[in-house]
Image (cartoon, grey):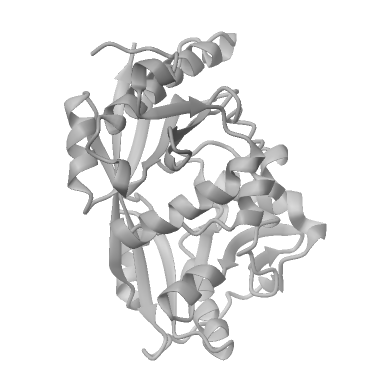
C-alpha cells in the first residue's frame, strides 16, 4: 500500500486538517482518551499533569513524531504518535500509538493515520540504525490493542501486522485471605526514598533485562515517567535490601481518576521485580502479600497488576496461585521491517 509522510492537505482531505502536536492540544487529547475509555472500554489513565510533564519525550519529538487531526469545524478527530528508542541496544523497535474519535471513524481516517505512523516509524528506525552499534539490530514496528477491539486489529492485520504477545491486567479481591509471609533471614524491608533512587532504576533494569521487549530505562527517563507521576505512591513502595544492595522491589500506584470514574477503590502493583541473584527465595510472594496487607489497611477493595502472559519467570502462575484473575487482555501486533 502507498505511504506518504506528508499529511493530507485540507484541500485534498476536505474533512480533516493535520498539524503538529503542541502543549495547547493536551486538554483536547485528554478528552479524547476519556471518550475512548467510555466507548471502547479502554483504560487510559494519564492525567493532564502527567501528559504535560511527558510531552517532551526523548523517544518522540511532538513536532515531528505526532499529529493532531481535526475536522474543518475544529473538532479533534484523531491523535497519533510514534515512539522509537534513539539508542536501541537489543532491538530497534518503533511503537505506534493512535486513537480516532468514535464519531470520526469509518471515513478512511483509520487507514490514513496508520499509514502516516508507519512511514514515520520507518524513518525513525532508519535514523536509529545509523549508530554503528544499532546498524545490525532487527527492526520492527509494534502496536497494541485491547483484545476486544476486533476492527482495528483486523485493519492492522490487513497491513501485515501479526500477533506476537498478550498481556493481562489481573485483579485480586482484598476480601480474600492474604497468605502468610515472612522475609528471609538477613534481608530487610524499607520504603522508597530518593537516597536509593538511581539504585532502584538500575535494579529494575537488571530484573527485567531478560523479559520480552525490555529496553533499559535511562536516568533521563526515570523520574518523569516512573517517579514524578501522579499515581506513584512513595509511601507504599517497598524495597527488599540485602545490606546496601536492592534484592527486590514493588512499586505501587493508585490511579485516582480511574477509581473515581469506575466508582471503585483499587490499588496497583505497578512493577514487581527480583534481581537474578536473589530469585527463588520467595521475595516476590513476600512483597505481594505485604502489599495486599498495606492496601487493605489503606481501605482499598482490590489490587491489580499487569503481566506478560508468556512471562518465562513464572510470574503468571504465581499471581494465579495467590488468587489474581485476568480482567483484561491486551494484544501486541508486530510488523518486521527490512
Identify the image quadrant of the N terminus: top left
Percent position (x, y) of residue 186? Answer: 67, 72
Work out whether residue 106 can be spotted: yes
The residue nearer to you, when weighing 246 against 256, is 256
* Relative side of 9 to 317, left or right: right
Q: Is residue 290 above or below residue 54?
A: below
Residue drawn where x is 29% and y is 25% of the image: 335
Identify the image quadrant of the C terminus: top left
Percent position (x, y) of residue 122? Answer: 42, 16
Percent position (x, y) of residue 52? Answer: 66, 47
The residue nearer to you, when weighing 201 against 175, is 175
Q: Is residue 122 above or below residue 213?
A: above
Residue drawn where x is 21% and y is 24% of the image: 160
Q: Is residue 27 above or below residue 338?
A: below
Give the number of marks. 0
Work out whether residue 282 can be spotted: no
Residue furthest to the right in view is: 195
* Relative side of 122 to 235, left or right: left
* Relative side of 246 to 72, left or right: right
The residue nearer to you, when weighing 19 against 172, is 19
Residue drawn where x is 47% and y is 13% of the image: 123
Residue drawn where x is 54% and y is 89% of the image: 299
Percent position (x, y) of residue 309? Answer: 30, 53
Amino acid at each position: 500500500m502507498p505511504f506518504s509522510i506528508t499529511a493530507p492537505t485540507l484541500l485534498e482531505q476536505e474533512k480533516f486538517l493535520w498539524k503538529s502536536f503542541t502543549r495547547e492540544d493536551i486538554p483536547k487529547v485528554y478528552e479524547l482518551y476519556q471518550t475512548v475509555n467510555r466507548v471502547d472500554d479502554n483504560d487510559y489513565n494519564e492525567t493532564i499533569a502527567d501528559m504535560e510533564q511527558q510531552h517532551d519525550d526523548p523517544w518522540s519529538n511532538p513536532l515531528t513524531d505526532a499529529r493532531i487531526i481535526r475536522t474543518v469545524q475544529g473538532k479533534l478527530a484523531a491523535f497519533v504518535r510514534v515512539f522509537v528508542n534513539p539508542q536501541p541496544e537489543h532491538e530497534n523497535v518503533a511503537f505506534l500509538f493512535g486513537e480516532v474519535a468514535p464519531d470520526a471513524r469509518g471515513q478512511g481516517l483509520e487507514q490514513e493515520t496508520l499509514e502516516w505512523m508507519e512511514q514515520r516509524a520507518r524513518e525513525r528506525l532508519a535514523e536509529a540504525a545509523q549508530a554503528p552499534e544499532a546498524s545490525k539490530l532487527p527492526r520492527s514496528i509494534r502496536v497494541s490493542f485491547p483484545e476486544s477491539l476486533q476492527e482495528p486489529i483486523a485493519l492492522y492485520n490487513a497491513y501485515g501486522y501479526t500477533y506476537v504477545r498478550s498481556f493481562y491486567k489481573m485483579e485480586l479481591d482484598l476480601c480474600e485471605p492474604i497468605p502468610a509471609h515472612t522475609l528471609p533471614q538477613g534481608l530487610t524491608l524499607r520504603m522508597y526514598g530518593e537516597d536509593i533512587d538511581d539504585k532502584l532504576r538500575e535494579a529494575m533494569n537488571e530484573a527485567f533485562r531478560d523479559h520480552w521487549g525490555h529496553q533499559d530505562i535511562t536516568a533521563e527517563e526515570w523520574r518523569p515517567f516512573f517517579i514524578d507521576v501522579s499515581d506513584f505512591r512513595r509511601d507504599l513502595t517497598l524495597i527488599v535490601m540485602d545490606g546496601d544492595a536492592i534484592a527486590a522491589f514493588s512499586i505501587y500506584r493508585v490511579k485516582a481518576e480511574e477509581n473515581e470514574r469506575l466508582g471503585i477503590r483499587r490499588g496497583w502493583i505497578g512493577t514487581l521485580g527480583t534481581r537474578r541473584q536473589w530469585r527463588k527465595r520467595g521475595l516476590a510472594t513476600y512483597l505481594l502479600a505485604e502489599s495486599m496487607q498495606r492496601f487493605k489497611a489503606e481501605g482499598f477493595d482490590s489490587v491489580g497488576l499487569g503481566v506478560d502472559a508468556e512471562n518465562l519467570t513464572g510470574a503468571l502462575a504465581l499471581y494465579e496461585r495467590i488468587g489474581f484473575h485476568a480482567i483484561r487482555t491486551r494484544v501486541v501486533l508486530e510488523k518486521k521491517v527490512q
